[in-house]
Image: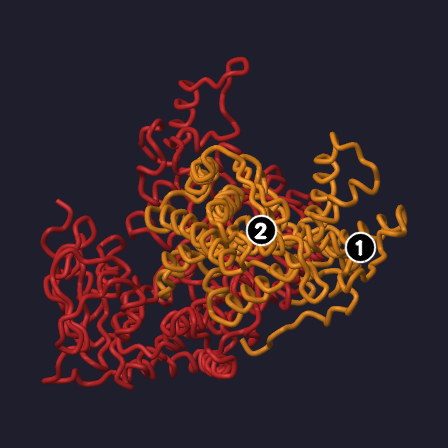
Amino acid sequence: MSDVRRAPAVPAWRKVTQHRLFWPVVALVVLIVACGIKNPTFLSVEIRDGHLFGQLIDIARFSATPLLLALGMALVIATGGIDLSVGAVMAISLAVSLTYLDGNPNADSAGTVVVAVLLGIVVALVAGAFNGFLVSVLGVQPFIATMILMVAGRGVAMLITQGQITTVTSAPFKYLGSGFVLGIPTPVVIAAVMFVAVAILVRRTALGMLLESIGINREASRLAGVQSRNITWFVYVLAGMLAGIAGIVYGAPTMAADANNIGLMKEMDAIMCVVLGGTALAGGKFYLGGTVVGALILSTIERAVVIFHIPSQITPLFKAVVIIAVCIAQSPRLREYLKPRRPQRPRSIVPAALAVKEAV
Amino acid sequence: MAPTTEPTGTPVVQMTGITIQFPGVKALDDVDFRLFPGEVHALMGENGAGKSTLIKALTGVYAIDAGEIRVADRTHRFSGPDEAQAAGISTVYQEVNLCANLSVAENVMLGHEPRTGPFISWRKMRAQAAEYLARLHLDIDPASLLSAHSIAVQQLCAIARSTVVEAKVLILDEPTSSLQKAEVDELFEVIRELRERGVAILFVSHFLEQVYEISDRMTILRNGRLVAEHRTADLPRRELISLMVGREGAELDAIEDGVQSAHRERPADVVPALAAVGLGRDGSVEAFDLDVYPGEIVGLAGLLGSGRTETVRLLCGADRPERGELRLAGETVKISDPLDALHKRIAFSSEDRKKEGIVGDLTVRENIALAMQTMRGVWKPLPRKELDEVVAKYMTALKISPADPGMLVKNLSGGNQQKVLLARWLATAPRILILDEPTRGIDIGAKADIQKLVTDLAADGMSVLFISSEFDEVLRVSQRIDILRDRRLVRTIANGPEVTQDTLLAAIAAKGEVA
């Protein structure tokens, strides 16, 4: 008991290469550098009318939606669940907001827009609460439970817009998608604020640890007093709310509530960001910082496709190849394989029996 | 060190200089091990000594960092359990690793199904399976579901499977820990027959009695290093224990005496800290009365499946009782869930450390903090400083090793995991502590530590319900003993010098013994 043996100290460079985020960050840097070489203007960021412009800024802007979704998704995945409905929830929240604005004569006043946005978010929250109810109270498998809204959600959005593509014009609403705050695109600011808020929520309280505990061992957590029902429910509500915000940010530039296409397949993007960030789909440990890197990789890939003139038909293939490469590089098995084995000590192969006899 | 008589022939397994490094710990350090055909070889050592690691190296679960494994005179570098199996090594684990939802025949013949053309011949398969089972004196329907049988039978099926693949080496890892006495006898009968046939058997068990009954030789490990190899007959029990623990026998006696002398008079005219009146739940345990006074340790004794666990689960919110009432210090309460129980200062440590105890991928620190944290609520995290103090306090007091609170708890040995769990519950400052098999699968040193701790806690006024399959342990720590039989609390015995293991056995076996 007394002699605690410790492994020799790990050299600093190995600590870096062994870090969870090493490969995702490498992938991101490689993508950006490759784009920069192909098209030198890619890396330039300029200030026009006090606003930041440039391809890198665009990448950050396009990362906002997947990041908002992925933040909620990461927490849901940590509990061992999944939320397939976030794309549909985006469509619902946007439909609610725009329909409200559509029927309102003061669509251009900030106050009306605030109400519209809040309405959209509240409805998204209700959608999340519905998911959470199915999963945590009724015990429906998360995949099936959230698939209900994934399919039905677009019908709900359709019902709200009465089958039309509702379009409105409202400057304050548009600002949420294509405006700037202190020179930074509004979506980036919104995503950053939500990231910080969620990070504080999970890491400055015990929520993060308890989430992970539920994802790792639900029964042990229950016996230790973890209220997994409440916590799980809460997480789905949060994921719904973030999806609602994502829907509004995503739809604001065009202000067209296309119930069929807003947020289509975005749940997969969100899952991808979470996985790229090093969170296992099996649940347990989750990494919000990694999720940010995942979202950046995703939108950089989408940019790279344009820069390298990759035919749009094979874009998904390109995306898939990059993602698979990162996932393989991150996998514990490959790391284990790449870890240099300590050289074997040369040993005299004297049979133990003989050695014992000699000892006598 | 050396055995007096060399076993004849060449070893079927020869492991030389085996070293396995885990993050932060050297689990095995230059260990030699050999196993001869036709012997039962016991692998002995405390928790964390490296027994499981050595077995996992031999079965290809872990890759070795240094050393050599020779099986039947061929050097192997196993990169997976399948390769070890192909080399003739079969393993039967404590938790049976078969497919419970398949039939007995399918399990026994898995991978060796008799075929006609590309199709499995089910009839032939059942017939062959029955034959293999018969050789182990097992007369069960091969078409029945494996899960329909007791753990003992399932284990025998696993052994039958090893005879199908004609294993040269059979590893039995704690095979008896959930078996009844008669089942153990049957298992030993089978082991002896396999030994006659020349199979080399590696036997791991915490029951010294059984080790001495069945084994021919033993290898003793301590702290990941080889201590000695002996013929069983040449090694008296006390010497074995001091080899395993690395302490002198007298020291052990002192610990045990310390535990014994902690017995005190049963408190009089006080209200029980906890009293159950007619508490029960259908399909779980019949209505029972039970009480425990402040500062008292009440033992629960009974055979496996007698309802010990089910009984205490009704007291701590793990299961909800369907009838009866629960009183805490005389006051009737309702406990809705484990968190509610913790708030009422009742802590329950489950017997299933892996499934219901530790949260493997969290650190030792987080595991200790867990119950404390849930009591504070999600939104009020423990201040880091306070947490570190509590963790340091319990890690020192319980001698948790390695002394690194940042380590993942799954990388600790079983005994240390158990101590982490104890720390978790003690950190909630319970008035009533329910311990279900707190010393199962734990080495003697840690066991004595835990017994001592429990008696000390009781001396400070805590009430303890103590479940154990080991009667001597129950007798040593408890002031009163509740006897359970067939999911019914049948009687309560006041402990005293005249109460012995036989008393408990007699109480358990009293009238109504299987008709």
Instruction: Find disc 1 in the rendering and name its residue.
Output: A54
Give the chain ID for the orange colour.
A
> What residue is drawn where x is 71% and y is 48%?
A299
Is B185 left or right of B109, judged from the image as shown? left
What whole-number distance in Å separates the C-alpha atoms at marks 2 and 1? 26 Å
- Identify the image quadrant of residue A265: top right
Instruction: Find disc 2 in the rendering and name its residue.
Output: A170
Q: The residue under label 1 is which amino acid type?
A: Gly
Is A305 left or right of B321, judged from the image as shown? right
> What residue is drawn where x is 43% and y is 22%?
B125
**Which of the two discs, 2 and 1, labels the residue nearer the N terminus?**
1
> What residue is drawn where x is 18% and y is 59%?
B484
Task: Look at chain B in the picture and name its colour.
Answer: red
Q: Which of the two residues, A77 or B467, is positioned nearer the viewer here?
A: A77
Q: Which mark identifies residue A192?
A: none
- Which residue is situated farthest in the top direction here? B117
SS at mark 1 in the image: strand
Give the chain of mark 1.
A
Is B500 left or right of A326, judged from the image as shown? left
Q: The residue under label 2 is which amino acid type?
A: Ser
